[in-house]
Image (cartoon, coloured by chain):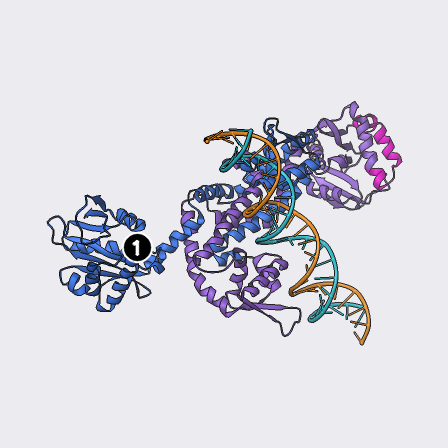
Chain colours: A blue, B purple, C cyan, D orange
Amino acid sequence: MTGFFDTTGKMAIGSRLRLLTDKITEDAAQVYGLYGVPMQPKWFPVFYVLSRGENKTITEIAREIGHSHVSVSKIVREMVQKGFIKEKKDKTDGRKNLVGLSAKGLEINEKIAAQYIDVNNAIEELTAQTKHDLWKAMEEWEFLLEQKSLLRRVQEQQKLRESGQVKVVAYQAKYRQAFYDLNEEWISTYFKMEASDYKALEDPEGHILKKGGHIFVALYNDEPVGVCALIRMNDPDYDFELAKMAVSPRAQGKSIGWLLGKACMEKARELGASKLYLESNTILKPAISLYHKMGFQKVAARKSPYERANIQMELVL
Amino acid sequence: MTGFFDTTGKMAIGSRLRLLTDKITEDAAQVYGLYGVPMQPKWFPVFYVLSRGENKTITEIAREIGHSHVSVSKIVREMVQKGFIKEKKDKTDGRKNLVGLSAKGLEINEKIAAQYIDVNNAIEELTAQTKHDLWKAMEEWEFLLEQKSLLRRVQEQQKLRESGQVKVVAYQAKYRQAFYDLNEEWISTYFKMEASDYKALEDPEGHILKKGGHIFVALYNDEPVGVCALIRMNDPDYDFELAKMAVSPRAQGKSIGWLLGKACMEKARELGASKLYLESNTILKPAISLYHKMGFQKVAARKSPYERANIQMELVL
DNA sequence: ATTGGTTTCGTAACTGGTTACGTAAATATA
DNA sequence: TATATTTACGTAACCAGTTACGAAACCAAT
């Protein structure tokens, strides 16, 4: 199997870790024999926490060593049977099973001290021959995975790669149907299509583009999966309104909304706009949070041609 | 369980590895879901070796991925049942079970490519945040453990520490019994006590020390566990003979013979000797190999007062 | 005092691996 | 050609952990 992991890449890190773990545990079992300590490697963590004298309950031990309580329970049973530890019921709490080292266990504890030293030295010496410290590397991984799981890290990479495959292009006639469908889908899911919707969606050329607005289409594998419009406003405060943003639920998680928003912002900036406006509804949580991420801030209510609008936001470019 | 491994020391490296492995494997299972690949982490190594097109036998796969053939056999059964791989008997060897990816398996292989990339990147990014590279550290450990197992490394540390606890001191009257017993033990195990043995062992002061010889005693926990004599010779070729070396079988593996031999060599050098002589028997393999390690070379036979002597050696100081 | 939720810990079943062992085919040897 | 050894691989049993679930004890709020 030499070199298998050189070819697989990091995908197989789990397998590789398991193999190394097995090899080390196997040797560990024999190391106890070397010192005449009749103990199994799997007992060690339990033994260790008890070796500091205090009696502990099953759950306490489990938490401390990072096992399930069931595992600790089994190990304790085996060690009791061997006579290394003794159990007694907690006086004040009848559920608790207090366990501690027996006289025989304490005896083992004496004997094992030399083993600690030798194993530590053996590993220390081995580590001295490596460029990369396994022990410290594990510590770092534990810490980093605590912060953010491997799953989430992979998810982020996936999103990153997939959003890289998304192209945002300017509207063309062939996207008219997609512009209609994508918007109709979410509007009629959460609300009702209104008169202004039909006007803008059925004739984007007439109602948006000819009036100096712009429409962007997000393509994934050359399929339109998201749209967004930048509509010219007749208002002293604002030049453009960001509207009609829609992303196919089948293409979620690729940051498509963000890419469309960015495209609109850039176009507006290019056209010399200084402020963007938008209307939305607070039940659309992901949309609102996207707008926030883009830099939009809530502003006082204005009157709107749309019934569903219950929040207004602006962005200073 | 935070910080548990900070206190245990390296003894618990097996436990720590297992915990990390479990956490990673758990996430890996979910990662497949992210890509719509209905695969289990444990299948991956098998899948991977087959993904390069060739059909392989169970044993070949097992060897390549470092599992037992039984494990591969089970995994293959599951994957066949899922329709990812297909089996067929080898034409030329009826025992072999050739397996390869099915059409469905090849399809999965297409889908999984993106996953490879993302996982690799996720781990790469994680690694970039660490000071110690886990992947490379594992590689180094695998290599070093291949060279010399953890068990042997611990064994060496043990020996080193224990031989440090052995003191070699000059003979005193209180060690007369030990000098007799330790020698009598091995001589009568392998041979028969001879007249010369009784003389030297019953009166070491008269037969060895008074004639300008020396005796060393190895103490372990202040108990005599080994002895060795440097006997003045009446010979133009040699000044001293190394003889009556005995180590208690209860104290084996602590390099006691070597320490005694060293002590004799040093004393002889101190006394201006230029060559040491010894007699032994070839059935005493460990003794002969110790003498070799000390630098003794076989020389032509000489006549000896001992029947058991069938090899003679010398050491130029 | 009752009731309902939480904690402790045990049993049962499952999981992903292992070793032990048996059988059949292939290969080596007398 | 017959016989012994080796190889491929399957079944069974085991192992060290897990999750699921349930019972009893405890706690808290009526």
Subunit under mark 1: A
- Residue at label 1? A190
Mark 1 surroundings: few (<14), some (14-19) or many (≥20) residues within 10 A: few
- Judge whether residue A8 can be spotted in this image: yes
Q: Residue at x 24, y 52 (%)?
A: A308
Quarter of the image with the N terminus of chain A is bottom right
In the image, B97 versus A192, the foreground residue is: A192
- Judge whether residue A117 can be spotted in this image: no
Q: Is residue A169 left or right of residue B77?
A: left
Query: Which residue is the extreme one toward the right?
Result: B195
Query: Which residue is the extreme one toward the top?
Result: B173
Query: Which residue is the extreme one toward the left?
Result: A236
How far from the left and from the top, in percent, is residue B3?
Answer: 50, 35
Residue B124 on the magenta span: no
Secondary structure state at the residue bearing disc 1: helix
How far from the left and from the top, in percent, is residue B229?
Answer: 77, 32
The quarter holding residue A199 reads bottom left
Residue B195 on the magenta span: yes
Segment colored magenta: B186-211
Amino acid type at mark 1: Tyr
In the image, C4 versus C14, the foreground residue is: C4
Q: Residue at x 49, y 58 (%)?
A: A8
Q: Residue at x 43, y 56 (%)?
A: B34
How far from the left and from the top, in percent, is residue A184?
Answer: 27, 61
Give the number of marks. Answer: 1
Vertical placement of B59 versus A233: above or below?
A: below
